[in-house]
Image (spheres, grey):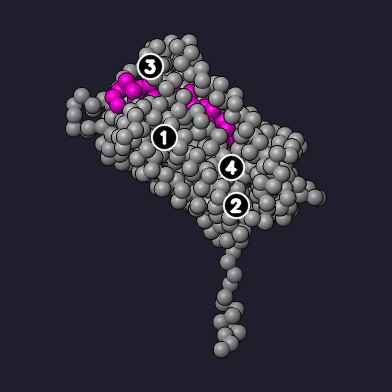
Amino acid sequence: MVAPAAHIDRIKPKSAYATEVGATLALAIPIAATQLAQMALQTTDVLMTGRLGPHALAAAQLGHNLYFPVFVTILGTLFASSAMFAQELGARRYKGVRRTFRQGFWLILSVTLPSWIYFAHAEDMLVAMGQAPDLAARAQEYCDGVMWGLPFMAGFALLRNFIAAHGRPRPALWLLAIGIPVNALIDYALMFGHFGLPRLELYGLGIATTLVQAAMFFLLLVYILRNRRYRRYMLLIRFWRSDWPRFRELWSVGLPIGLTKLAEAGLFAATGFLIGLIGVHELAGHAVALQFAAIAFMIPFGVAQAATVRVGLAVGRRNPDGAVLASRVATLVGVVVMVPSALIYVFCGEILVSLFLDVGDPSELPAVAHAVTYIAIAGLFQFADGGQSVIAGALRGFKDTRVPMVIALIGYWPIGGGAAVLFAFPMGYGGAGVWAGLALGLFVVWGALALRLRLVAGQLTTSAVPVAVSG
């Protein structure tokens, strides 16, 4: 039966905005869930290590403090592959997808040996920093186990970027979801010597992490190589052949991202050292508040990676209007999704803190009060933290990474870090001053990146022949 003409007139196609919002959320939600699953893996390790006692927990944290900067820098550098995959797919240059894929692995191999040398000297570095020799020795045990998983962790990240650029990030999420209980089981077996295995404690913790990362990498690689959608790329054909132009491009686009991520992680780590100078209760409250800030950040982190893909696809298709639309939609979504967490953090702080601290114990009330204050401040800067992350992701879609790196370095450290010291000590606001300085730095970076995105998008739309911007 044919629909009446009047009825046909009332049927309107989806608006471009609605379509873009749907596409962005379809990518962002599973990516954010994947990041939360990654955090759950780390939380499992912390919980299992706690059963070895506070000494082991402190030693593992020292080892993780050495591991995390390397992890963040490599992961950030590999973010370049997301933009490059997307632009090649948008332009239907499938050979270019294979080139990026192969050189991503070359990049991982190029950093593996230096990273292993770095981890092999963990104890010496920690002792040189003034840490207790017994803690440094146990931290070395952890690093001796976890160091072997670094290339697998990085490889898994590259594979995740590859499937996300195709709009199919869920296989990585399922693998991580399975990996959480498997990781707990292997921790239990190797750390405590169950199922007939030797008791390896922190070395066992590191080995368990390596085994889980290796398993997830190989399973995702097999899935990609056997999937009909991806087999056409012949991803590993002539893997040993050099491709120096693409290798240099990965480093050129990716290293500024890695350094930006390192600067951001370093600022949050530095706030802990600053608050540690103020008092124990303040530091305990800071540790609790930081957990909630990190959890909330996973949501805009997913939107940011979706923005990179959506913008990159449009740039590859030489569709400047589509690239601008994708960046605007992602920016709007990134701010909107932070509203619930902002409201919860501002108005329900004590309820959240009660998950970590005993609000009925008078001895813990000072820490509870500080945690509630810091969480409220975190609620207020949720918009800036989410906004700057998403805009940076959109700029990566344009391959614009160097200027954003400079903006981040200045905003995070001289402005954010400087304000934290000023507010906390000369002005006397203590831990709240540190968090206020952190908030100021994030708002400055958010505003400056927004201006940069407007400039880059304007250059693209006024260009006679739309091309990727390289900042």
User: Given the image, on which type of amino acid does mark 3 rest?
Assistant: Leu
Give me the residue at 51% from left, 17% from top. Answer: 121
Residue in front for this viewpoint, 187 or 386: 187
**Residue 159: where, in percent of width, then height?**
57, 45
Apparent side of residue 273 relative to residue 194 in the rendered image (left or right): right
Comparing labels 3 and 2, the label whose residue is closer to the camera: 2
Mark 4 vs 2, N-terminal side: 4
In the displayed structure, 124 sits above or below 114; it is above
Q: CA distance from mark 3 to mark 1?
A: 20 Å
* Sequence-first tag of 3 and 4: 3
Name which of mark 3 and mark 2 comes first in the sequence.
3
Q: Judge whether residue 214 can be spotted in this image.
A: yes
In terms of sequence position, does the residue under pointer 3 or pointer 1 come before the other? 3
According to the picture, the residue beneath numbered tag 3 turns out to be 135
In this view, the residue farthest toward the front is 196
Residues at discs 3 and 2 in contact (Cβ within 8 Å):
no
Mark 4 or 2, closer to the camera: 2
- The alpha-carbon separation of the residues under discs 3 and 4 comes to 34 Å
Q: In 3D space, how far apart are the residues under numbered discs 4 and 2 (Cα atoms)?
A: 14 Å
Residue 64 inside the magenta-drawn segment: yes
| Res 225 label | 2
Residue ID at (54%, 21%): 118
Q: Marks 1/4: CA distance?
A: 21 Å
Distance Cα–Cα, label 2 vs label 1: 26 Å
For residue 208, the mark is 1
Q: Amino acid at mark 4?
A: Leu
Residue placed under numbered mark 4 in the picture: 158
Mark nearer the N terminus (2 vs 1): 1
